[in-house]
Image: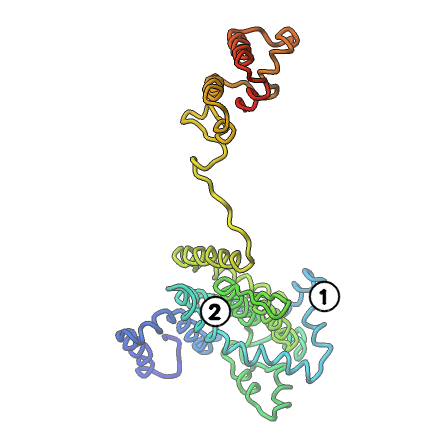
Amino acid sequence: MIVMGMPSFPYKLIIPLLYMLVLSLPITSQLFLPAAPILLWLLLFYSCRFIDVSARPHIWVSVLPTLETIWYGANISDILTRFGHPFLDVLAWIPYGVVHFMAPFIVAAFIFVYAPEGSVKVFANSFGFMNLMGVIVQIAFPCAPPWYELREGLSPANYGMRGSPAGLARIDAIFGGFGYTIAFSSAPVVFGAFPSLHAATATCEALFLSYFFPVKFHLGPWRFDARILYWSYCFWLYWSTMYLMHHYLIDLVAGGCLATFSFYFFRTEEVRDAMERREALMEQAEREESGEPEEEVFSLEEAPFRHSSNNATSTHAASSANQPAQARSHGNAISEMPQEPLERDPIFTLEEGDAESPNHEPSQKNGNLSSMSSTFQGQGLTRPAVASSYR
């Protein structure tokens, strides 16, 4: 507001007064309060043209192409612009010159209607502050775009130069207009190649759509994931920015990193918890649709083995229920004794004798087991029956 030359004082005061008026109304405040970061970004983007030239930093012409050649081995933007065709021009114009300006409103509308409460505010904060930080970097670190290298070479740049529509001039020629030529020639930020806010916007939209709407749908025998469409548009716009000579690949990487940082930084715990509950419901619906059986959960009474409160004894409920009452009582008496590791059956170990194991000494417990074994034999019970009761 201070550096803004048009409108002049006191007419520029109408802007904050009008904003306070819309915030005072409950209906309009629901829209303009979350949009505050976006409006601040647009105000800074428009006002930066009025910054005095003496206060502006040096314009970097060779930094971006040099870094791109070092990091990626070649100037990717220059390679993509060598193959031009009217069909490719229109294909690049659709995401860069049309969809880019409509997509934020469409994404915000879907989030407002279908996403959890408070999600549209998260999107507005992330989108607005992302662009605000991007414009601040462009003002503090101005870099020449690829069209400047093609038109002026590596000669020093100055703030008196006008912008260029670059590849979009061919779109004006195809449709017989001058819209993009006029718009880019009077752009307030001429040397704003780094970071690419086109790439940042597309990445931000793809991140939010993938997070809130990971839709999967069937088309005949095929199954599609909507996230493929989101990121296909994102990479489509990446290609168009380089094909139309407005950005280097390093600009796209910086814009994508800026969008990713804003997405995770402004996402709130309330929205995250709501999405976790929604994901659980979606997974349950997918299991029901695919016919997968649900996992059975046994209670203590229904479990095949019943454990005592001290976790020291266990009896097989199904087998002991079919045994005679007397045998079951003896089996319970055996199970109440402290159990040894079940490497060898203690009842069948009695037949082999204690002397067969060099590390095993006779004990009172073995004597008790021997007497119980003879008792079972006297009652007509065989050893397998006792072993079954023990297990």
What amino acid is found at the position of numbered circle 1 in the picture? Ala
Q: Residue furthest front?
A: 380
On screen, residue 349 versus residue 103, left or right, reads right
Query: In the rendered image of this protein, does residue 283 appear above or below residue 35?
Result: above
Q: Label 1's element? A: loop
Q: Tag 2's secondary structure?
A: helix
Residue linked to disc 2: 131
As measured in the structure, the alpha-carbon distance from the residue carrying label 2 to the one carrying label 1 is 28 Å
**Sequence-first disc among 2 and 1:** 1
- Residue at left offset 73%, top offset 78%: 83
Report x, y in % for residue 61. Answer: 62, 70
Q: Residue at x 56, y 80 (%)?
A: 97
Q: In which quarter of the view is residue 386 placed?
A: top right
Tell me which amino acid carries mark 2: Asn
Furthest-bottom residue in this view:
176
Residue bearing mark 1: 74
Image mark count: 2
Picture quarter with the N terminus? bottom left
Depth check, front residue: 105 or 305: 305
- Tell me where residue 70 sits by quadrant: bottom right
